Amino acid sequence: MRHSESLYFDVRRLRYHVRHWPGEAGRRIVLLHGWMDVSASFQFLVDAMSPQWDVFAPDWRGYGQTDWGQSDCYWFPDYLGDLDAILERIQPEMPINLVGHSLGGNVAALYAGVRPARVAKLVNLEGFGMSATRPDQAPSRYARWLEELRSPPRLRSYPDFAALADRLQKNNTRLTRERAEFLARHWGREVDGQVQLRGDPAHKIVNPILYRYEEARAIWQKIRAPVLWVDASESEALKRIGIGAPQYAERRGAIENLRHITVPDAGHMLHHDQPEALAARIEEFLLSSA
């Protein structure tokens, strides 16, 4: 297993944890994890890649070893602000390669459109956005948000790390026991004799601002970096969100220079299910002249 070091940056009034697998500066990548995940989740992918890659992976605000937010809920634009500040610390003078999964893929794609000069290449792993919304959904969404602020959500505790590993394998039947136990140690921490997830429960509070697909698409159209758009053959994420095949194709079509691939025998957590196959495709893309 490739060794990583922990770096800590002061980012927008938070102490940010950034995991670093040292390599060559000319082959630098930033990996962005998804919702309720942590940076260590990329360990299997990093192990499958050449050790020459210089890899950084932050724990987003409210996850892993990064400070929790200073409010009672989380706002999506903060991820863009945090990423911008982190990249200024990692590689301020040159464009950088971004690889984002799910939430991280959505952040990376938006950032690549808002700051096109800062991104060399983008790999988007199942980060296809949310379902489109209508203005008439706003009243109920704000009402739901207010109710959830009154009764904040909580995260389940587990008796030990083995029980958390059991749950991870139940959620993803492709996950080996060795990988589940590794993830449990990074996703959880011991508190008062129980194991609790490291994420802030406030992440589960609904966003009161509706997802505006038209705005996201307008930003994607500004992306100038080559994009590798990756989905998983057995993922249920599109179905859960309610995005059909025509809408999915339209979203990919918003990006000018895009290559679309599907990783076989993998679910939404494709970096856990098929890290070797995924690593090969990512390296091929990053090293290509496209």
Image (tube, rainbow, N blue to C red):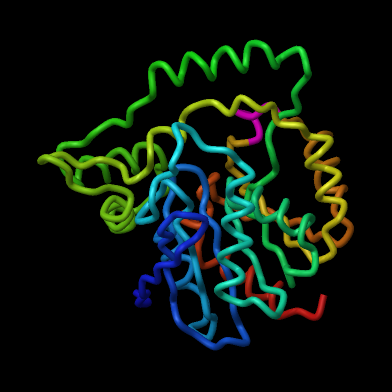
> Residue 103 versus residue 140: which sits nearer the camera?
140
Quadrant of residue 39 within the rendered picture: bottom left
Q: Position of residue 156 (x, y in %)?
A: 28, 31
Foreground of the two, 5 or 124: 5
Magenta residue check for 51: no
Position above or below: 98 against 93? above
Does residue 186 appear left or right of residue 246 in this picture?
left
The residue under the point 76% across, 30% down is: 244
Q: What secondary structure is the magenta-colored segment mainly?
A: helix
Residue 201 position by quadrant: top left
Q: Residue furthest front?
A: 13
Vertical arrangement, residue 236 with respect to residue 257, above or below: above
Q: Please state if 179 lies on the left or on the right of 228 as rendered.
A: left
Question: Which quadrant is the C terminus positioned in?
Answer: bottom right
Considering the image in quadrants, where does the N terminus appear? bottom left
| Residue shown at the point (67%, 62%) measured from the top left | 123
In-image side of 129 versus 62 (left or right): right
Q: Which residues are magenta?
A: 238-242
Percent x, y for residue 67?
A: 38, 51
Name the residue located 52 percent from the left edge and 16 percent from the top edge.
146
Does the magenta portion include 239? yes
Q: Please count the marks in the image.
A: 0
Residue 108's spot in the image, x, y percent?
A: 66, 56
Residue 221 higher or lower than 196, as above or below: below
Q: Nearer the viewer, residue 14 or 115?
A: 14
Residue at 50%, 71% in the rendered image: 56
